[in-house]
Image (cartoon, rainbow, N blue to C red):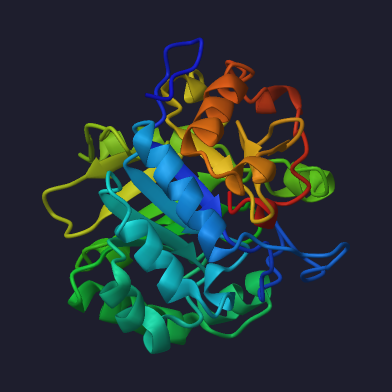
């Protein structure tokens, strides 16, 4: 079992398969994707080795991320690789959703279990202003198709003062009769967004207090769940979640590791550097890769230190899919 020196166990791998994104979100890639070096993304064979190694060390959930993972033409094959790996029980993906209506059936047939879709506003004009794309109606259509196929859907919205910081009621109204979890994520500082962060950051703690006052109840967190605190209410089909990375003890329940699209192990989203594991993916021995993972995990810190302004190597969230 992958376990660090603080007793945290890692059942959950976030695997980026590209850092390319076709959206230009204000908080992530406001100038669009910039290719500043050669991109030699992980091959299917390397992804198979990663899945097998992590599964043999106790990981049971893999989330495919980007950039935007659907920009890889071999995405269905990658999903199938993950789903067919012995020990992997859950395959999830985070997407901006622009190809959902056209591709969701293929993804489900390949073995996808759940989907996170990024939507920062339910107002089409606001959505287009944030992302640079007028695709909200298409994305919402895709979400409905995914739900009809039995896929568990969560929607992620980054809290921003100017755009949606005072618009919580519209999110609650949407999940009143929609069986999705809408998760509000506190804007996080990265290497290139300090000015935007200072202007737009909204704390989620007051929202949590309001939800509790309104009768929402905190759900028990699953073993392979992410960091969200999720709430349910008897009058709502959907649920609401809060991701509060600046909150006390946020890192105490960390259960996930990250691998970049170019084969770097990131012990934290805000680690000082990615650790190159790619040479071990081409070796004949699975045990060499697994032993290297165990050894590298010894360097994992107790916290991300984000509350102290430490953003590490993360220049923008598309690097690792958040």
Give the side of residue 25 with respect to residue 97, left or right.
right
Image coordinates of residue 269 in percent, x first then y, are: 62, 38
Q: Residue at x 40, y 83 (%)?
A: 103
Q: Which residue occupies the extreme front position in the image?
A: 284
Q: Image height check: is 261 above or below 38?
A: above
Q: Which residue occupies the extreme left position in the image?
A: 234
Q: Image height check: is 261 above or below 22?
A: above
In which image quadrant can residue 186 be found? top right
Give the side of residue 250 with respect to residue 90, left or right.
right
Image coordinates of residue 216 in percent, x first then y, are: 23, 40
Q: Which residue occupies the extreme bottom position in the image?
A: 102
Q: Is residue 153 visible?
A: no
Image coordinates of residue 245 in percent, x first then y, are: 55, 33
Image coordinates of residue 165 in percent, x first then y, are: 55, 52
In the depicted view, which residue is nearer to us: 306 or 236?
Answer: 306
Q: Image height check: is 153 above or below 14?
A: below
Q: Residue at x 32, y 49 (%)?
A: 240
All told, the count of numbered labels is: 0
In the depicted view, which residue is nearer to us: 210 or 301?
Answer: 301
Q: Image height check: is 240 above or below 189?
A: below
Q: Residue at x 27, y 81 (%)?
A: 145
Q: Which image quarter holds the N terminus?
A: top left
Give the side of residue 38 with respect to residue 181, left or right.
right
Q: Residue at x 43, y 39 (%)?
A: 54
Q: Is residue 250 visible?
A: yes
């Amino acid at each position: 079992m992958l376990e660090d020196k603080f007793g945290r166990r890692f059942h959950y791998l976030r695997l980026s398969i590209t850092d390319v994104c076709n959206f230009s979100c204000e908080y992530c890639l406001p100038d669009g994707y910039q290719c500043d070096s050669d991109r030699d993304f992980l091959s299917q064979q390397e992804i198979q080795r990663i899945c097998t190694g992590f599964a043999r060390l106790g990981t049971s959930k893999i989330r495919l991320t980007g950039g935007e993972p659907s920009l890889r033409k071999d995405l269905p094959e990658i999903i199938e690789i993950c789903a067919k790996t012995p020990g992997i029980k859950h395959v999830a993906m985070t997407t901006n959703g622009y190809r959902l209506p056209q591709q969701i059936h293929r993804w489900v047939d390949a073995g996808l279990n759940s989907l996170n879709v990024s939507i920062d506003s339910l107002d089409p004009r606001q959505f287009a202003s944030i992302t640079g794309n007028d695709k909200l109606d298409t994305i919402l259509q895709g979400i409905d198709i995914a739900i009809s196929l039995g896929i568990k859907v969560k929607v992620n919205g980054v809290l921003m003062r100017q755009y949606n910081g005072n618009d919580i009621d519209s999110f609650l109204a949407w999940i009143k009769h929609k069986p999705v979890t809408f998760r509000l994520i506190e804007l996080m500082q990265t290497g290139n967004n300090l000015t935007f962060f200072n202007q737009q950051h909204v704390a989620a703690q007051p929202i949590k207090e309001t939800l509790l006052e309104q009768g929402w109840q905190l759900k028990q967190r699953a073993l392979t769940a992410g960091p969200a605190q999720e709430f349910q209410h008897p009058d709502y089909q959907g649920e609401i979640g809060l991701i509060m990375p600046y909150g006390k003890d946020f890192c105490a329940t960390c259960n996930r590791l990250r691998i970049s699209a170019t084969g770097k192990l990131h012990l934290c989203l805000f680690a000082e550097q990615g650790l190159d594991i790619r040479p071990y993916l081409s070796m004949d021995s699975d045990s060499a890769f697994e032993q290297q993972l165990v050894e590298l995990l010894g360097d994992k810190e107790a916290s991300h230190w984000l509350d102290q302004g430490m953003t590490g190597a993360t220049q923008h969230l598309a690097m690792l899919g958040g």
